[in-house]
Image: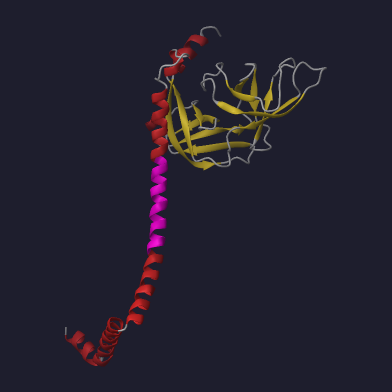
Amino acid sequence: MRNLFAFFLKYHFFFLFILLEIASIGMLIQTHHYQSSRFASSSNRWSGKILEKFNSVTDYFWLKKINDLLAEENALLRNKSLHLPSLEENIYKNQHEYISAKIIKNSYNKRNNYLTINKGSMHGIENGMGVITDAGVVGIIRDVSPNFATVMSLLNKNTIISARFIKSNHFGELIWDGKSHQFAQLKSVEKYVPVNVGDSLSTNSFSNIFPEGIALGTVNRFERDENKNFYTSIEVALSVDFSNLNYIYVLKDKLKDERTELESKNE
């Protein structure tokens, strides 16, 4: 206490000067309109900049939370829509459940590409489930931990998707050649099948991973050799932009075990 008193006594002229300066600035602002307005303008400008930065940070986190909530809401709406009556309603209308998840890692320029999502076995996700977005097919669940899962992307040499032409209902196999993340190749299409640029492709009922009708892409170009029984090349422009993925849906097939068990009896 004695040292503190000695400190103030030693520097009392300095503290007195600071107090007088503050008092004179206050009197100047109060008695002169111009200085008062300039001070207010300057303080508003700096406080505005600080608030702007603060709001930018808070907006970022709020937007992230809002995006997460919207993804969950979309999944709920998708699940509810499965129960709406329609002319085509049958047992398959209630076959799939949608689980929303966020992509936390994504590759699309390698030979074998994978994604990581922030949901795992604790959320009902299992190996072999299909993964989609609103735009179309993304891939298939590969490995699962309690809180995370990896997805074998459609952009992977080991991924084969059973596809069909929406217009003609003919089918083929969609694979990726490891080149562009925008295109894949449709194989095993017989030469008598009518193919045109712009034809749309989707998943078909042969798959036990994806329901029928999930978008895959459109025919970009094709080649046919009359001496061969199959098209030599059909290039498909993918419906999903793999360079810009944030949220996905994992498809839980409620009847998969029943179908697998039944079909295994014929093998």
Confirm whether the magenta stretch covers residue 53: yes
Image coords of residue 163 (percent x, y)? 61, 22
For the residue pair 228 and 89, the one nearer the viewer reads as: 89
The kind of secondary structure the magenta stretch mainly shows is: helix
Spot the residue most to the left: 1
Residue 124 seen? no
Image coords of residue 63 (percent x, y)? 41, 47
Q: Residue at x 63, y 19 (%)?
A: 167
Image coords of residue 187 (percent x, y)? 69, 23
Q: In the rendered image of this protein, does residue 35 appear above or below residue 10?
A: above
Spot the residue most to the top: 266
Spot the residue most to the front: 33
Q: In the rendered image of this protein, does residue 97 appear above or below residue 100?
A: above
> Could you tell whether 87 is left or right of 219 in the image?
left
Instruction: Tell me which corner region of the image, top left, top right, bottom left or bottom right, holds residue 244.
Output: top right
Magenta region, residue range: 51-68
Q: Residue at x 33, y 79 (%)?
A: 36
Confirm whether the magenta stretch covers residue 111: no
